[in-house]
């Protein structure tokens, strides 16, 4: 990443914090949205001139120690802090490989989940394998080729791909997908990520708009509402587990025993078997 990217990210995070949020109070005659550069410099215990040059991309990347103080001053989340380090060129030397080879033990785990939909994905969002229930719930992802193998690419270029989520969740899903791709792109350090992002910025005005907002976040486990044409809306628990070394994610959907969603999964299983 260039110093311009670091500068832009610092400016966007500074603008997102209001002075009264950190006890500086509302200042009169403010022409700058959010904190002033001097505020961040003071909070990070660096000189105002040094910080100004960082935001103007007129100086080399900060040391890890300075990055840590900047992360605290700008109240970055853990994902945002990691992103800051990586665009400054301070990421750990060992990066997860984008492998499409699924370890036999992981494949057995996916197959063994039975009526719980499960699949293995790359960090950038490409489905590698699905068990039969995942294909029944989410569609068979093995039919896609080229960029369409990537779920985020489909989300922003194929309106039909959005039918799996309720319409009221579409905006949040879009925000989440862009924030995830931004975080993962610097984590994996793969030219494919930059190419995918460039393609999406050209092909989707929505993606471009959200990309410019500089959101950074990694999707984690939680409740998901999914829509299926035969069984309706399912409220499922989505468990996301990372496999170390291979740069892959195990994504599984479960329902509490006796819940409506559990009954819907059983119905889906019967429909698929029939």
Image (cartoon, rainbow, N blue to C red):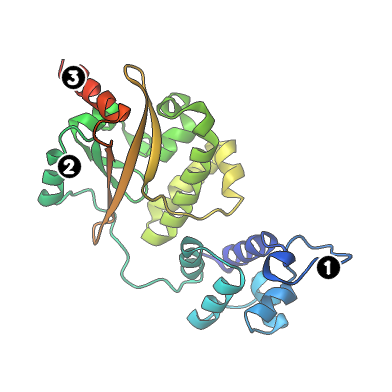
Q: Is residue 92 left or right of residue 179?
A: left
Q: Quadrant of residue 127?
A: top left
Q: How many marks?
A: 3
Disc number lying in front (2 or 1): 1
Whichever of labels 2 and 1 marks the residue nearer the N terminus, that label is 1
Disc number lying in front (3 or 2): 3
Which mark, by number, is residue 221?
none
Q: CA distance from mark 3 to mark 2?
A: 19 Å
Assign the C terminus to one quadrant of the image: top left
Q: Is residue 17 left or right of residue 82?
A: right
User: In this orientation, does residue 189 appear?
Assistant: no
Instruction: Tell which of 112 and 216 is nearer to you.
Output: 112
Instruction: Tell which of 28 and 13 is nearer to you.
Output: 28
Q: CA distance from mark 1 to mark 3?
A: 64 Å
The correct choice, above or below, for 129 with respect to 16 in the image is above
Which mark, by number, is residue 110?
2
User: Where residue 168 sits in the image (x, y, percent)?
Assistant: 53, 30
- What is the secondary structure assignment of the residue under circle 3? helix
- What is the secondary structure assignment of the residue under circle 1? loop
- What is the secondary structure assignment of the residue under circle 2? helix
The correct choice, above or below, for 207 with respect to 78 in the image is above
Which residue, as the protein is rendered here, is positioned at the far front?
Answer: 258
Residue bearing mark 3: 270
């Amino acid at each position: 990443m260039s110093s311009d990217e670091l500068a832009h990210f610092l400016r966007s995070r500074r603008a997102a914090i209001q002075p009264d949020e950190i006890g500086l109070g509302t200042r009169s005659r403010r022409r700058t949205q959010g904190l002033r550069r001097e505020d961040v410099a003071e909070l990070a215990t660096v000189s105002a001139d040094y910080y100004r040059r960082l935001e103007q991309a007129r100086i080399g990347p900060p040391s890890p120690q300075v990055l840590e103080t900047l992360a605290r001053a700008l109240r970055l989340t853990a994902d945002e802090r990691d992103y800051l380090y990586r665009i400054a060129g301070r990421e750990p030397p060992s990066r997860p490989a984008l492998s499409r080879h699924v370890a036999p033990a992981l494949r057995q785990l996916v197959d063994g989940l039975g009526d719980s939909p499960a699949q293995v994905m790359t960090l950038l969002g490409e489905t590698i394998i699905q068990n039969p229930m995942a294909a029944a719930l989410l569609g068979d992802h093995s039919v896609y080729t080229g960029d369409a193998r990537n779920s985020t690419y489909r989300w922003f270029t194929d309106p039909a791909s959005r039918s799996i989520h309720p319409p009221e969740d579409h905006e949040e899903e879009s925000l989440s997908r862009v924030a995830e791709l931004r975080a993962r792109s610097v984590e994996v350090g793969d030219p494919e990520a930059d190419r995918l992002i460039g393609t999406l910025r050209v092909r989707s005005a929505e993606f471009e708009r959200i990309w410019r907002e500089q959101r950074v976040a990694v999707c984690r486990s939680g409740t998901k509402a999914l829509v299926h044409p035969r069984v309706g809306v399912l409220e499922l628990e989505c468990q996301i587990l990372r496999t170390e070394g291979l740069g892959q994610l195990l994504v599984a959907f479960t329902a509490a025993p006796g819940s409506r969603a559990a009954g819907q999964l059983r119905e889906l299983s019967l429909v698929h078997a029939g």
